[in-house]
Structures are given as structure tokens and as C-alpha cells.
Image: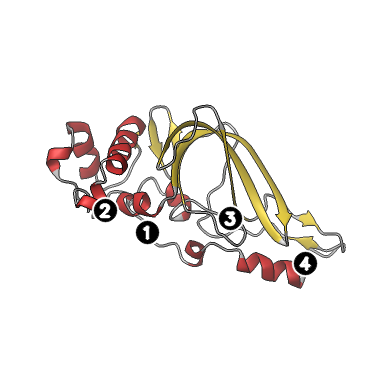
Amino acid sequence: MKFRPTLIAMLCALAALPAAASQLVPQNLKQMIQASDVIVSGDVAKVSDGIENGVPFTEVTLKVKGSIKRDLATDSSYKFRQYGLLKNRKLPNGSYLLAAKIEGMPNWTVGEKVTAFLNKPSKRNGLTSPVGLAQGKLTASGSKVANAFDNQGLFRNVKVDPSHLNAAEAEMLANQGGGAVEGAVLTNLVRRAVKEQWIEKGVMR
């Protein structure tokens, strides 16, 4: 049995890679807010994979609990696709497309409670990914959230006018050592930063 993808499928797959996948560039909170097309919180309801036009994808369905930058109805379903397969897939010609893992691409598990800062989908193939790949997927554990890197660098070089922060937000931003943070505190800060245009107005820099 040959575990070898066809040349055409391989070329299509490479062309579908998100730009951020070529190198895992550190992203702080300001950069993630600025780059995201939608910021969505919810429960992972379904994870599936497939191939469309030669491009392998994993499709994630979230049950929405909250959204920023786009008005998504509570308890609605929000679907997006990222590059790659969950498992090897047999092609019509008998060869296999391997479930190659891109370094830094997040994994998704049904039942997880997540907040995802998602890039704008590609016009070419509809694929997207969290900003900074796994950096842009925060998973909840109790009331706290953290990404796959334990939030290392999340607040590095993020400066916010102190007059716009409450005590909990100021304490969170002052933590440069990583570690899980209170999800409600982070979400409230991000929501206000977007709604009040902190980045555009220089409040967050």
C-alpha cells in the first residue's frame, strides 16, 4: 500500500497554505485583534475533514456564545475551514493524501470551549486559520483561558492608556510571564478595544 499523495493534490495543498503557516511569528493581543476578521467564542460542536478541488481541509463548527467584529447570533453555528486533514485519506486513483501536520496549526476537539481570533478566509479557497495559528485559539479551563503556548507573549509590548482599564484588566496586562487568564476579563477588554477603536485612536498600541 502506497501512502503517497498525487502530485496535483500536493501542489494544490501547498498553494492553499495560509501565509502565517510558513513561519510561526509571535503575535501579541493587539496584533491578534488588529489582524482578525472575526473573534468568536463558543463550544466546538463538530470537527470533520475533506478534500475540495484538491485541497485538504479540516472543518470546525462552533456553537456561538459570543462574537466580536462580526454580529453572530448566540447559539448559531459558525463554520470555518483550516488547512489539513484529520487522518490519511484514500484518493480515487488508489493513492493516499497524508494528514500532514503544519507546525503551529491548532487542533480542535468536540466539547472544547474556545475563543478564536480568525483571519479573513482566503478568496481562493475559503481556508482560514486563527491569527498566529495556535496562538489565536484560546481554550477555556473553568473560568480561565490559555492558548497552546500558555499565553507566552500574549501581552508583550501591549500598551494601553491606564485611564481606560479597570484594576483586573491592568493586572492582566502587567503579567508578562504567561499563564491562563480570566476569560471574562480578557473578553471584556477585547470587546471594548474593538468597539471603542482603541487601536485606531492610539489607546492601545
Q: Are marks 4 and 2 in contact (CB under 8 Å)?
A: no
Please tell me whether mark 3 or mark 1 is closer to you in this view. Answer: 3
- Residue 133 position within the rendered picture, expressed as x and y whole percent measured from the top left: 48, 54
Distance from disc 3 to disc 1, alpha carbons, whole Å, reads: 21 Å
User: What residue is pinned by disc 3?
Assistant: 127
| Furthest-left residue in this view | 163
Q: Quick check: 172 left or right of 107?
A: left
Earlier sequence position, callout 2 versus callout 3: 3
Earlier sequence position, callout 3 versus callout 4: 4
Within 10 angstroms of label 1, few (less than 14), some, or many (20 or more) residues?
A: some
User: What residue is pinned by disc 1?
Assistant: 26
Distance from disc 1 to disc 4, alpha carbons, whole Å, reads: 33 Å
- Checking the image for residue 156, the label placed there is 2
Dot 1 amino acid type: Pro
Q: Quick check: 59 left or right of 150?
A: right
Q: Residue at x 50, y 30 (%)?
A: 73
Earlier sequence position, callout 2 versus callout 1: 1
Q: Residue at x 17, y 39 (%)?
A: 164
Determine whether the residue tagged by mark 2 lies in a helix, strand or loop. Answer: loop
- Residue 3 position within the rendered picture, expressed as x and y whole percent measured from the top left: 79, 63
- Checking the image for residue 4, the label placed there is 4
Earlier sequence position, callout 3 versus callout 1: 1
Q: Residue at x 73, y 66 (%)?
A: 9
Distance from disc 3 to disc 4, alpha carbons, whole Å, reads: 23 Å
Dot 3 amino acid type: Leu
Q: Residue at x 53, y 62 (%)?
A: 18
Q: Are marks 2 and 1 in contact (CB under 8 Å)?
A: yes
